[in-house]
């Protein structure tokens, strides 16, 4: 090896020490500024009396006091609990169920998979009107069933204050359960066949094989599905706007729509920022433990 | 076909304008608005055509949806970014909110030269000004307190359009007995609030309306009259059909048109729907002022924002002058269903509903019973209006008692102020 | 896919199992109906003349199917005062989506590679911090982002919107690639280093050629997210440069006039076609991509 070549190699090696950092730096800087900088800005605004536009005079906790005195905020929180809980459970149950069924060497699996997955491709800006029609008692399912002769059939959840939030769940599950199905199908396909064979030899039935042996092996899949679903639930916005616009009354308000309404319809930036901070805290409470465990796991 | 007719109309306007305009032709405007369909889009089309005929460049920024909610989001982002649109469809106290932030520009030169003060209703002129200078130009006056009725259905129960809320209730009961839905309504917060303020006007009169919904007087908000208003709203709830929730207002209008419901309480943009359906006012449908002997004012206007560049500033001047020209006011409002904001424009070309609106407007100005609409953002800030809407719509959609609604309203208004 | 051969636990060998198998198909079919219903309503409505929508029910098949509403929605329906249909806005969306997807995918790939195969002190922390960006509600960043774009002189421009989507896509793209590259054996990289390959050499010649599953997942995800975005589009573009979702909203959210439901639905379908195509044709690879590593995330 000539001296020149070895010097070039040394240069490459030295460059390789700082190159990875240089390559990651722009993305990291962007996220420091555009994520953490903006969060800091929002936190600051939540301590001001900003109205139609940001103002920067410190006003203390006044917006938080107002927020927790606003009945609509409690409605939004309660709805988040109902919606978030049912949405996550619904997506997981249906997603896992479909994944297991599809895993049975089905004919037309490809077509079915596409059908289950396609709602992920559509935004509620696109499907909102169709959903509104289907759920509307005078236009949609109820009328179809009555026309078919089921005259007692009633399905008026969309216009019923108590039930409207459940129609949001139905549409939400429709959109996201296919993704969960895909995650679990991928997970099932990556399970070692030997384990399945061994279980079959031990005389375990299909149910016990799945619930007792295979699903527990898919813990990482559960974890990532739950995280994806949790953050979808907390960020749910288009869904509610397209389906109910928060109504009837304010019965289907969620924190994201609450915040948008106060920031942009009502010129209450300060109060909106306070609610945004509450949302961010909630998200952190869900995500940070996950990230921590995830990173620890990958380190070993 | 439609565009050919539009072109002829606006070419006519342009020719007329050529003689009257005081400002040199030219300039550029970028106009942010949420009139994207039907008569409204046609009306904006007229404005664009007239502006371009004067040699200007029109950049259209339509953002539809939610009565301008999406447009307001975009406007805020644009102002914060430092590239505001030239003119924005904005109204009522919203104009003042932006003016206080220093975001708007005045067109006082044009207004003074053309004598806007002499031709606009004083209450409206006040809303268009900030610091005594015009910052906005009104394109129309909508009346909110209308009852639209289907005469055939009324004939079936032998009734006329009611002139008091008691009479309304009696007629509604009769209609229900006959198996007819009395009230066509769309359950969206702003529509609930529209009915609410019309009821408030009818039960309390103009003075009560002004005290409670404009000046936010706590005694008025907390009064027995307000309880009666919510009592009446509870009755109204029983007059609507099961599928009302979330329904668009124009679908409610077609229910009256098609004989599926007897009444609708809605501003005169509903007339545009009837006319588009080929219906004749006074024959196929009736327009009558709601009880109260007053006039709830709603007006659309274009606010001039603080832009840089001579080209754009010139565009603002031309646009302001154009909007306030009598010819434009006539063409635009014929397309939109409202009446001209200028009180000196002849209404010969308009239908009987518009003429009635104009007469009542003049009378209301004289009797001081002209009140700005709360539901349509003419009276109070967006945050206060939002609190009204929350309470009204919660009450309408639940079994909340009137007393509780009043208590909640008082607490909410205090919180928002 | 040998796994498929053995995984089938319910086998068609006895009458009971035949019955189970039929049941299986029945259940799968029922779910397929649930998933297809909104799409069916949209397509059926888009093909009906307006008269038929007024008289018929929602779920009825079109009696006299017509493409007229679809054609109107494509190039002559009015959006504001401009009556050219959705056509120009579809191109706007393309002009925004393609660069944003390419840039964010590339950056995600190289980040994921650097963070897994060239670990340095704090690299895990950096990844964790970046990942949190995936969870921030976009309404929160609207105003500060607007100010930043204004300062950069990119407010109301397509490059500005590309920048926004790239930045808020980075967390996801980095996540997908990191999880993929974590599964790639470090030994290969070590061997390449000993052979004298450098940082970029290994990335372009060794890692990228291995990464198509991750690339497919990332591209599908990013394409769908960015194409479907409404909030950034409405806030950061001006009039004629609106993406198709904003134009669709303008077309559908009518405030007056006769509502042409068939044109509205046809317009919605037009706005959805690109993402649908991506899913239908690349969906297979999506699942394979998830199986190949992204699933660990």
Image: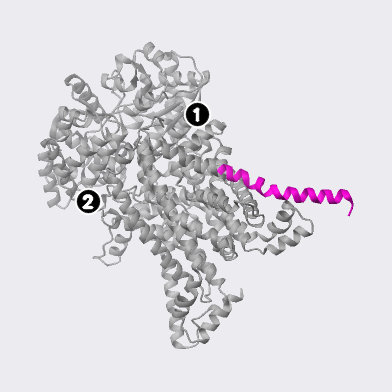
Is there any visible trace of residue B35 in the rendered image?
no
The quarter in which the N terminus of chain B is drawn is top left
Residue A170 vertical position relative to residue B61 in the rendered view, above or below: below
Discs 1 and 2 lie in a common subunit:
yes
Give the farthest residue toward the top.
Answer: B113
Q: Which chain is indicated by disc 1? A: B
Residue on which disc 2 sits? B241
Q: Residue at x 46, y 23 (%)?
A: B51
For the record, the magenta segment spans A1-30
For residue B163, what is the image quadrant? top left
Q: What secondary structure is found at the residue carrying circle 1? A: loop
Q: Nearer the viewer, residue A119 or C254?
A: A119
Q: In x, y percent, where is residue B260? A: 23, 49
Mark 1 and mark 2: Cα distance apart in space: 46 Å
Q: Would residue B394 be seen by someone viewing this image from the given angle?
A: yes
Q: Is residue A247 magenta?
A: no
The answer to whether B23 appears left or right of B185 in the picture is right
> Image point 32% across, 45% down: which residue?
B248
The residue pinned by badge 1 equals B83
Residue A7 lies in the magenta stretch: yes
Say left or right for C248 vs A154.
right
Secondary structure at numbered mark 2: loop
Q: Residues within 10 Å of mark 1 (few under 14, many from 20)?
A: many
Q: Main secondary structure of the magenta part?
A: helix
Which comes sooner in the sequence, label 1 or label 2? 1
Residue drawn where x is 45% and y is 23% of the image? B306
Above or below residue B256? Residue B340 is above
**Chain to which the residue tagged by mark 2 belongs:** B
Mark 2: few/some/many CA within 10 Å (<14, 14-19, 20+): some
Q: Position of residue A138 (x, y in %)?
A: 28, 55
């Amino acid at each position: 090896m000539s001296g020149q070549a070895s010097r070039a190699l040394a240069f490459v090696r030295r460059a390789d020490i700082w190159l990875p950092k240089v390559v990651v730096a722009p993305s990291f800087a962007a996220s420091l500024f555009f994520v953490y900088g903006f969060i800091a800005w929002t936190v600051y605004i939540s301590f001001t009396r900003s109205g139609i536009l940001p103002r920067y005079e410190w006003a203390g906790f006044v917006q938080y006091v107002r927020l927790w005195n606003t009945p609509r905020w409690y409605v939004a929180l309660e709805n988040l609990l109902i919606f978030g809980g049912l949405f996550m459970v619904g997506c997981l149950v249906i997603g896992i169920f479909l994944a297991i069924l599809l895993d049975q060497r089905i004919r037309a699996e490809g077509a079915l998979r596409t059908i289950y997955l396609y709602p992920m491709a559509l935004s509620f800006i696109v499907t909102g009107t169709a959903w509104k029609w289907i759920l509307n008692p005078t236009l949609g399912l109820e009328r179809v069933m009555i026309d078919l002769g089921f005259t007692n059939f009633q399905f008026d959840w969309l216009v019923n204050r108590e039930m409207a939030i459940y129609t949001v769940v139905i549409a939400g599950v429709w959109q996201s359960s296919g993704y969960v199905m895909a995650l679990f199908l991928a997970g099932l396909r990556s399970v070692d066949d030997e384990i399945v064979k061994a279980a079959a030899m031990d005389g375990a039935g299909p149910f016990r094989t799945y619930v007792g042996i295979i699903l527990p092996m898919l813990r990482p899949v559960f974890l990532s599905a739950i995280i994806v679903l949790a953050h979808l639930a907390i960020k749910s916005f288009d869904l509610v706007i397209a389906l109910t616009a928060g109504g009837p009354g304010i019965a289907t308000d969620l924190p994201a729509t609450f915040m948008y309404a106060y920031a942009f319809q009502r010129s209450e930036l300060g109060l909106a920022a306070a609610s945004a901070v509450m949302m961010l805290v909630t998200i952190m409470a869900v995500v940070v433990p996950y990230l921590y465990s995830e990173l620890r796991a990958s380190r070993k | 076909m439609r565009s050919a007719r539009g072109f002829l109309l606006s070419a006519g306007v342009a020719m007329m304008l050529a003689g009257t305009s005081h400002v040199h032709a030219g300039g550029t405007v970028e106009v942010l608005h949420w009139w994207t369909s039907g008569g409204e889009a046609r009306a904006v089309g007229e404005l664009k055509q007239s502006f371009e005929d004067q040699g200007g460049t029109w950049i259209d920024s339509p953002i539809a949806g939610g009565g301008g909610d999406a447009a307001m989001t975009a406007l805020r982002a644009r102002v914060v970014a430092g590239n505001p649109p030239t003119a924005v469809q904005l109204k009522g106290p919203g104009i003042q909110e932006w003016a206080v932030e220093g975001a708007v520009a005045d067109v006082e030169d044009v207004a003074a030269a053309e004598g806007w003060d002499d031709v606009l209703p004083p209450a409206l002129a006040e809303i268009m000004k900030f610091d005594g200078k015009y910052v906005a130009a009104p394109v129309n006056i909508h009346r909110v307190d209308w009852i639209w009725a289907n005469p055939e259905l009324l004939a079936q129960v032998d009734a006329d359009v009611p002139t008091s809320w008691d009479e309304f209730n009696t007629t509604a009961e009769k209609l229900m007995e006959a198996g007819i839905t009395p009230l066509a309504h769309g359950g969206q917060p702003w529509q609930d609030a529209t009915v609410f303020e019309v009821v408030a006007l009818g039960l309390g009169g103009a003075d009560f309306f002004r005290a409670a919904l404009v000046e936010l007087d706590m005694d008025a908000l907390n009064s027995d009259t307000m309880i009666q208003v919510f009592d009446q709203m509870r009755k109204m709830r029983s007059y609507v059909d099961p599928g009302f929730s979330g329904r668009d207002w124009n679908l409610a209008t077609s229910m009256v048109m098609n004989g599926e419901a007897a009444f609708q309480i809605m501003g005169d943009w509903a007339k545009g729907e009837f006319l588009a359906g080929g219906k004749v006012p006074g024959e196929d449908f009736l327009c009558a002022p709601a009880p109260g002997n007053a006039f709830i004012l709603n007006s659309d206007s274009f606010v001039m924002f603080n832009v840089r560049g001579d080209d754009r500033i010139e565009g603002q001047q031309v646009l302001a002058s154009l909007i306030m020209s009598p010819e434009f006011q006539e063409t635009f409002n014929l397309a939109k269903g409202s009446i001209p904001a200028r009180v000196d424009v002849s209404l010969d070309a308009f239908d009987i509903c518009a003429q009635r609106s104009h007469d009542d407007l003049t009378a209301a100005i004289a009797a001081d019973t002209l009140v700005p609409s709360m539901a349509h953002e003419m009276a109070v800030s967006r945050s206060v209006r939002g609190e009204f809407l929350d309470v009204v719509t919660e009450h309408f959609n639940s079994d909340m008692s009137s007393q509780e609604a009043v208590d909640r309203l008082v607490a909410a208004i205090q919180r928002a102020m | 896919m040998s796994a498929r051969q053995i995984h089938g636990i319910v086998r068609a060998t006895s009458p009971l199992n035949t019955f189970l198998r039929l049941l299986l198909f029945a259940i799968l079919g029922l779910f397929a109906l649930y998933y297809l219903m909104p799409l069916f309503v949209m397509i059926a409505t888009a093909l009906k003349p307006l008269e038929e929508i007024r008289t018929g029910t929602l779920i009825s098949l079109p009696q006299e199917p017509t493409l007229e509403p679809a054609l109107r929605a494509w190039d002559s329906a009015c959006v504001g005062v401009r009556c050219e249909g959705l056509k120009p806005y579809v191109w706007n969306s393309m002009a925004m989506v393609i660069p944003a997807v390419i840039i964010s995918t590339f950056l995600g790939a190289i980040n994921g590679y650097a963070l897994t195969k060239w670990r340095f002190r704090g690299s895990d922390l950096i990844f964790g911090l970046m990942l949190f960006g995936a969870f921030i509600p976009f309404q929160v960043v609207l105003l500060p982002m607007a100010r930043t774009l204004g300062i950069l002189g990119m407010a109301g421009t397509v490059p500005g919107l590309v920048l926004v989507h790239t930045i808020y896509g980075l967390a996801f793209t980095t996540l997908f690639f990191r999880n993929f590259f974590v599964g790639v054996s470090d030994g290969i990289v070590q061997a390449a280093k000993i052979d004298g390959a450098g940082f970029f050499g290994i990335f372009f010649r060794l890692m990228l050629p291995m990464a198509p599953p991750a690339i497919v997942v990332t591209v599908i995800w990013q394409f769908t997210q960015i194409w479907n975005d409404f909030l950034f589009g409405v806030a950061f573009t001006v009039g004629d440069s609106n993406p198709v979702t904003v134009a669709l909203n303008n077309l559908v959210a009518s405030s007056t006039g006769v509502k042409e439901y068939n044109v509205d639905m046809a317009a919605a379908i037009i706005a959805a076609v690109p993402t649908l195509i991506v899913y239908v044709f690349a969906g297979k690879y999506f699942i394979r991509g998830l199986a190949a590593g992204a699933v660990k995330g």
